[in-house]
Amino acid sequence: MIMSKRVLITGASGLLGRALFKEFESDASWDVLGLAFSRIKDPLRKVDLRNKDDVEQVIITFKPNVIIHSAAERRPDVVEKQEEATHQLNVAATQFICEAAVKVGAWVLFISTDYVFDGKNPPHAVGDLPNPLNKYGKSKLEGEKVTLSVNPGNALLRVPILYGELEYLEESAVTVLFTKVRATDTPCVMSDYERRYPTSCQDIAIVVRQLTECRLKDSSICGIFHWSGNEEMTKYDMAVDMAEVFGLPTNHIQRDKSASGGAIRPYNAKLDISRLEHMGITQRTPFKTAIKCVLERFMTN
Ligand SMILES: NC(=O)c1ccc[n+]([C@@H]2O[C@H](COP(=O)([O-])OP(=O)(O)OC[C@H]3O[C@@H](n4cnc5c(N)ncnc54)[C@H](OP(=O)(O)O)[C@@H]3O)[C@@H](O)[C@H]2O)c1
């Protein structure tokens, strides 16, 4: 029986980390410590996760039961150019976290990505062999391996393209499209090729808390999990939905049927989420409902 429940969240200033922090903070039974790096706002604590001693010190002092490791370099085009810097954060820091977690008996949930798959034979089940196509996917797969090799009792949660409460529109690969959607006088082109499953960070945060609660009751819960929205969309589809929820015209948005440029992306890395569904975890908000809440304040500025 666990008397106190302490969760440490890395990347708590990030797109997903903010939602995770809020979700655990809203439940008084959790004592939450959120870590950040450059965007330090009270109550977040600054820790450079690439520094082994600092990582060990914060974990040994706080003694979490659970660590949600969300911090990462997650921009595929940046990773292509900054492989070594990415390795430091996505792999080496993950190792520091998992090793320190062992010292205090903490369970680590590593947030990963659908980009560990090649997207050639969807839906991808938790037991399917990953085959990342780009350096970002490779670095996250390495982070996954470290997480489970340091402690096979740890877990991974793979998620697809995310959107959530924003500091600025470009923060998410989904919401960045809105810059062009709302400029209704300027024709624009949107990719209508790769299949995506945009997922709300708020939904992921609820799923993570529910999975964590299950783990505290059942210590055999470990390994690989997937969560995802269930609406298959191209970027063109997302753009049209965004326009529709705000009553904007769509005739300035044109389809581009060719593959996206930059780092190679999987065509359809749909995740099979049945493992979590069988545990009774089902949190999903329709795209139009969730995206409207996120974008509302950007309709005027
Ligand atoms: N966004 C997506 O569409 C998407 C899709 C699939 C999977 N994921 C995965 O989801 C997780 C969260 O992604 P996200 O979108 O929330 O990322 P994000 O918004 O880019 O946030 C990255 C976080 O990492 C922190 N960080 C960066 N360098 C650090 C360092 N040296 N030491 C400590 N912290 C550092 C940042 O802190 P500061 O900002 O304070 O510097 C920030 O909180 C990642 O593991 C990512 O791979 C994301």
Image (tube, grey):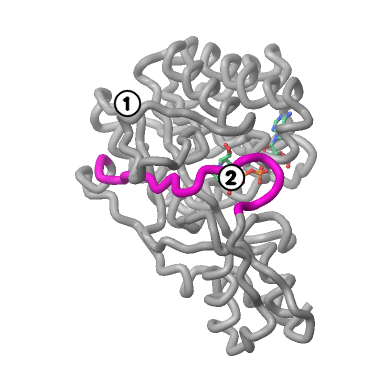
Q: In which quarter of the image is the N terminus?
A: top left
- Taking 75 as reference, is 174 above or below it? below
Q: Is residue 192 left or right of residue 228?
A: right
Residue type at tag 2: Gly
Front residue of 222/237: it is 237
- Specify the label residue 170 is tagged with: none
- Which quadrant does ligand 1 occupy? top right
Residue on which disc 1 sits: 222
Q: Are marks 2 and 1 in contact (CB under 8 Å)?
A: no
Rendered image quadrant of residue 178: bottom right
Please provide percent x and percent y for residue 183.
76, 80
Instruction: Specify the segment rendered in magenta.
Output: 259-275
Residue type at tag 1: Cys
Front residue of 267/82: it is 267
Residue 202 is at least partly visible in this image: no
Residue displayed at 61% across by 62% down? 191
Q: In which quarter of the image is the C terminus?
A: bottom right
Residue on which disc 2 sits: 17
Dot 2: what SS? helix
Front residue of 182/196: it is 196
Residue 113 is at least partly visible in this image: yes
Q: In this view, does 228 lie to the left or right of 265?
A: left
- Taking 157 as reference, is 277 above or below it? below
In this view, the residue farthest toward the front is: 258
Rendered image quadrant of residue 43: top right
Residue displayed at 73% across by 58% down? 170
User: From mark 2 to mark 1, how far is it between C-alphas?
Assistant: 21 Å
Query: Is 242 within the magenta?
Result: no
Query: Is 267 within the magenta?
Result: yes
Q: Main secondary structure of the magenta part?
A: loop
Dot 1: what SS? loop
